[in-house]
Every structure is written in structure tokens, then in C-alpha cells.
Amino acid sequence: MNHQLQRGLSLQTGSFVVKIKSSIPAVARGLALLYAEYPIIEDSFADFHVTISQPSTWRRYFKPQVLFGFEGVSPFSPLPYDQAFPMLEWGMNWCVTNHAHTYLSIHAAVLEKNGRAVILAAPPGSGKSTLCAGLMMRGWRLLSDEITLVRLSDGLIEPLPRPVSLKNNSIDVIKQFAPDSVFSPVVHDTVKGTVAHLKPSSSSVTRAHDVATPAWIIFPKYVAGSATSLTSVAPSRAMMQVAENAFNYGLLGQNGFHALAKLIQSCQSYDFQYSELDQAIVLFDQLSLAVAA
């Protein structure tokens, strides 16, 4: 893995091929741990060419740092050396949201069961990623933890299954909830707090080209001690909230408006409040069974 990564390793992640170059050991270890089941593409084509490297300055010896590179350009400021793998993950997200405009890209997790997709749209701290990880560990197929890709051509959801990014208390919650789960090493003091990445389920990776039909838009909120509740949301409010969470809604113009309107019309939208992950998963399973029936 190390030698191949230094030359350039082309990974198939959903519909995208990312060619990654790095000589940093933490990047190699993270890829070997979390991406072992992903296809490696042997030809030279890649949608995105990225690097994780150290700046060529005196700081590589004093307070070492890492840079994310895209097509020879560094779009972000350097981060501390121990944040190399999280920086790769964040950088790959940036590549998709800034360049894949045949989709309406929404900052939301998305999972599928019985052929129907649930979109979890919420700001940081809402419990979205915890809920996403819990659902995946209980049989839902992960399409994406961070980016919901709605195809402009037909409104279907394109999978982009990559490791689930968990932060702070959510890491221990999922480790206790699913003791057999596989995590990258925990990294502290990032801009997002303490972070670790959870390996996707094998079925999520092997079915990375199976699109899904959107059925629900859920706005989750974790509230300690609260009962599990699901409350209908009017389509007008749902459309406004999803538009606020979309990366390229304004850029797409009329195409973005029509894609979002079609998505809202095809889905049931709800506010969802929870405190117990097991109870939340029971409710989501009931939703999927109702559709299947």
C-alpha cells in the first residue's frame, strides 16, 4: 500500500475515481483500514487527483503540518501533521461538492432500505452522523454520511459510500452501540473537535452503484432525555431547509430549483427528535416496512 500510494493509488468511491498520492504513514494506514474493500482502478483515468503532503518549509521540522493538494493547487490552509487522514476525507468531500454539478448536492446523510432512501439533513451537533452510523450498523445501506447526490436527470440518489465521520461523544456512543465496528485512530483538537472515521458496511461498498429512490427527508435533533417523536413538516418549510443545506443549489439555477422541487414532492418530510438510538432505529425500520408493504 505505501509504495503504491506514493506513486498514486486510484480508488473507486461510488461513481468517482480518486487518485491519491501521499508518503504520510497515517494516510496509508487509514486507507488500508477503511478502504480495503473498495475497487482499485489500474488505468490512468481519475475524476480527481489529490495529494496529502508536508509543506516544503522549515515547519516540516518544527510543528509539522500537512497540505491537501488538488490538481497541483492547495485550496486549504495547512493542518497539524496528525490530522492527515481527516484532511484527506474532508478534501475528497470538497472535490465532489465543488465539481460534481450533474447532481444537486445536499449537506446531508442518506441511507437506503427496501429500495427507498431517507435523507438526514441537519446542522452539526444535531446527532445526524450518530443516527446515520447507528442505522448503518443495523442493516441500512449507507449511501453517504456527508453528501446526498440527487441526479438532475431523474431525481434518484447516487451513492457515495465513504467512511462515516463521527465527532466528540458520538465516537464512544457508536463504539458502545456496535462493539465490532472498525474506526480510524481518534484525532484530537481539529476544527471539528475530536474526530474518527467509521468503516462502511461491506454491503454499502459492494452496492455503491445501486441508486435509490428518495422517500423521506428527516430533520433530526438529538435532545438528551427526550422521547422519540416524528412530526410532519410542510413541503414549503422542507424545501427552504434543504435549500439552505445544499452546496450548489444557487449555482445550478433553474435546474437546481426543479430538482429540489421534485425531491420535496416525492418525499414525506419530518422533524425527528430522539435521545435513545435503539428507539430511533425501531422507528426508522417501521417507516421502511410501511413503504415495503
Image (cartoon, rainbow, N blue to C red):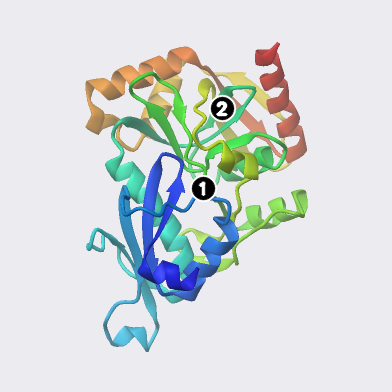
The reply, left or right, for residue 122 in relation to residue 228 is: left
The reply, left or right, for residue 118 in relation to residue 14 is: right
The kind of residue tagged 1 is Arg
Q: Residue at x 57, y 57 (%)?
A: 34
* Numbered badge on residue 162: 1
Q: CA distance from mark 2 to mark 1?
A: 17 Å
Mark in the foreground, 2 or 1 = 1
The kind of residue tagged 2 is Val
Q: Provide residue 24's location: percent of width, then percent of height.
A: 44, 74
Q: Provide residue 179's location: percent of width, then percent of height.
A: 77, 54
Reading the chain from its start, which is encountered first: label 2 or label 1? Answer: 2
Instruction: Answer with the quarter of the image where residue 9 lies.
Output: bottom left
The reply, left or right, for residue 78 in relation to residue 32 is: left
Q: Is there CB contact under 8 Å for labels 2 and 1?
A: no
Q: 124 or 29, which is in the foreground?
A: 29
User: The residue tagged with tag 2: helix, strand or loop?
Assistant: strand
Q: Which residue is mark 2?
A: 118
Relative to 81, is 243 above or below? above
Confirm whether residue 167 shows in the render: no
Instruction: Answer with the quarter of the image where residue 50 lies.
Output: bottom left
Relative to 193, is 38 above or below? above
Count the marks: 2
Label 1, residues with CA under 10 Å away: few <14, some 14-19, many ≥20: many
Label 2, residues with CA under 10 Å away: few <14, some 14-19, many ≥20: many
Q: Residue at x 68, y 15 (%)?
A: 292
Q: 216 or 37, which is in the foreground?
A: 37
Q: Provide residue 20's location: percent of width, then percent of height.
A: 38, 61
